Amino acid sequence: MRPRFSAGASLGVLGVVLCVGAGAAAPAPPRTDTELVIFEAASLKAAFGRIAETFERTHPGTKIVTNAAGSQELRAQIEHGAAADVFASADRKHMDALVGQGLIASSRVFTCNEPVLVVRAALAASIKTLSDLPRADRIVFGAPEVPIGAYTLQILRKAATKYGDDFATRVQAKVASRELNVRQVLAKVVLGEADAGVVYRSDALSAHGDVRIVSIPPELNVTAEYPIAVLKSAPHRQLAEQWVALVKSAAGAEALRAAGFSPCPGW
Amino acid sequence: MWSAALGTLSALLLLLVLLPVVALLVTASPRDLLRGLADPLVGPAVQLTLATTTLSLLAIVACGTPLAWLLAHRRTRRWRLVETLIQLPVVLPPAVAGVALLLAFGRRGLLGPLLGHAGIGLPFTTAAVVLAEVFVAAPFYVQPAIAAFRRLDPDLVLVARTLGASRPKVFFSVALPIARSALAGGAALSWARALGEFGATLMFAGNLGGRTQTLPLAIYTALESDLRTAQSLSIVLVVVAFGLLVAIRAGGRS
């Protein structure tokens, strides 16, 4: 039998399905839960997901609603009046900007994240330390405008003191792309298009099977500090304080550690 | 009543489409604009964007016109299916389009080994930018071109043939001149889509100044550090696009 395919008919069916679907979705279900809105840096998604399960279990009637995006976007949304209770940022710059505008009273650093080298599995034998990086044919970094790219530049500057002045030049000569966020850097290495890149350990862990993780020597590395704060305009201030307390607790630290985050140096 | 309803609904849509563009233009002071234009991202990005979109438009017109001519005269189910398939890039989210291009032409993609043997590595090259632009923009030319060729009076073709014109002669001397205005409109739309192309390029070609960083990628890069630079770059994009669209449409009519 020939398939009875017609573009017009399928489009028509699709249209009907979409309209019915939209109609059915329109009346929102009655809300009984209190919704606590967490604005979180994209890298926190997995860890905060686990902490949210714990929070909802110990706070019946409360539902955690998360908005995960780049810290810069979250900051812009808060500046334009988004109704959030808690903001957890991947760097201090954006948090401090909100403090400066009087939208947040004060923030606390709650965890740290460490840049690592990720290497395409097939090259694991030839790139074993940061000093081997110039052996890669195609390297991807974050753009200098985004935090991971800025950290990468700092690491290269420090590495020059140990591996020679031309180290950074030899590495930069192999850079094939400066990606706009850390997930794009990781994706290029996972897909095998790039040989190596620099990402946070938390991102590297999420792709552990596909890439080899090479730690950067601590004396050459930098630390990304993650601050958290309750917004002054938080609709549920008390619950928000309890969320921050849970994130800072031993249970929160364990969820963060499992996702690749680490206690900050000096803690 | 009727004309009031028409007017109100039209005004609503115009407001929604035009107000953000107007806001983009009026909220930047001339000083912001000049400072933005002086940003080192701008020059190479504008050059690269004009070069790649010109190449992709040439490729789309060169291959898309024959395809549209074929599709316009084949009405079997199989050809109808081809006509639908060529439209798919329109609905694909740009980042997915980028991943799909990687899975096809990347180093580990379907054609990866073949290209590798020939010594060709597409990702992270300017060629990848052109490829991504052709992929997302081609449907915007092919569909209007099919419609234009279908509107052609069949008797006209018949008369030309009985007068002894060969099939290529009919295509070049009868069909193309009549369809010219519609083809130019499609080309303008297609070119505009290539000009704004962002997601597939970022995924497939990466982001390196002078090699793969087109204007939309430069704008997004600037957005990470300075909103004003991003805004003035966007104004450049809007002005360039508007100018070229007007020029192409005028060329199609004359």
Image: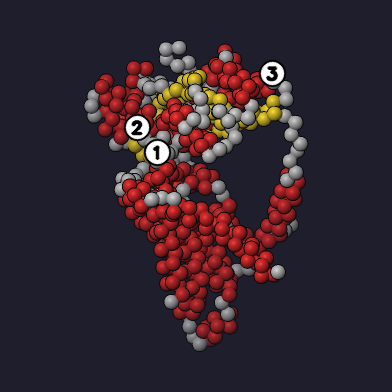
How many marks the image carries: the answer is: 3
Residue B118 seen in the current view: no
On whether disc 1 and disc 2 are found on a single subunit, the reply is no
- Mark 1 and mark 2 in contact? Answer it, CB < 8 Å: no
Residue sitting at x 54%, y 20%:
A256
Chain containing the residue with disc 2: A
Q: Amino acid at mark 1?
A: Ser
Q: In the picture shown, does residue A12 fall above or below B146? A: above
Q: Which residue is mark 3?
A: A58
**Residue A60: x, y in percent?**
72, 22
Labels 3 and 2: the sequence-earlier one: 3
Left or right: B188, with B87 as reference point:
left
| Gap between marks 3 and 2 measured at Cα | 49 Å
In what element is the residue under mark 3? helix
| Gap between marks 1 and 2 measured at Cα | 29 Å
On whether disc 3 and disc 1 are found on a single subunit, the reply is no
Q: Quadrant of the N terminus of chain A?
A: bottom right
- Tag 3: Cα neighbours inside 10 Å, few (<14), some, or many (≥20)? few
Residue sitting at x 31%, y 48%:
B38
Q: Which mark is residue A136?
A: 2
- Tag 2: Cα neighbours inside 10 Å, few (<14), some, or many (≥20)? some
Q: Nearer the viewer, residue A168 or B156?
A: A168
**Residue A110: x, y in percent?**
50, 19
Q: Nearer the viewer, residue A102 or B224?
A: A102
On whether disc 3 and disc 2 are found on a single subunit, the reply is yes
Q: Amino acid at mark 2?
A: Ala
**Residue A83: x, y in percent?**
60, 35
Q: Which residue is mark 1?
A: B225
Chain containing the residue with disc 1: B
Chain containing the residue with disc 3: A
Left or right: B243, with B67 as reference point:
left
Residue B9 seen in the current view: yes
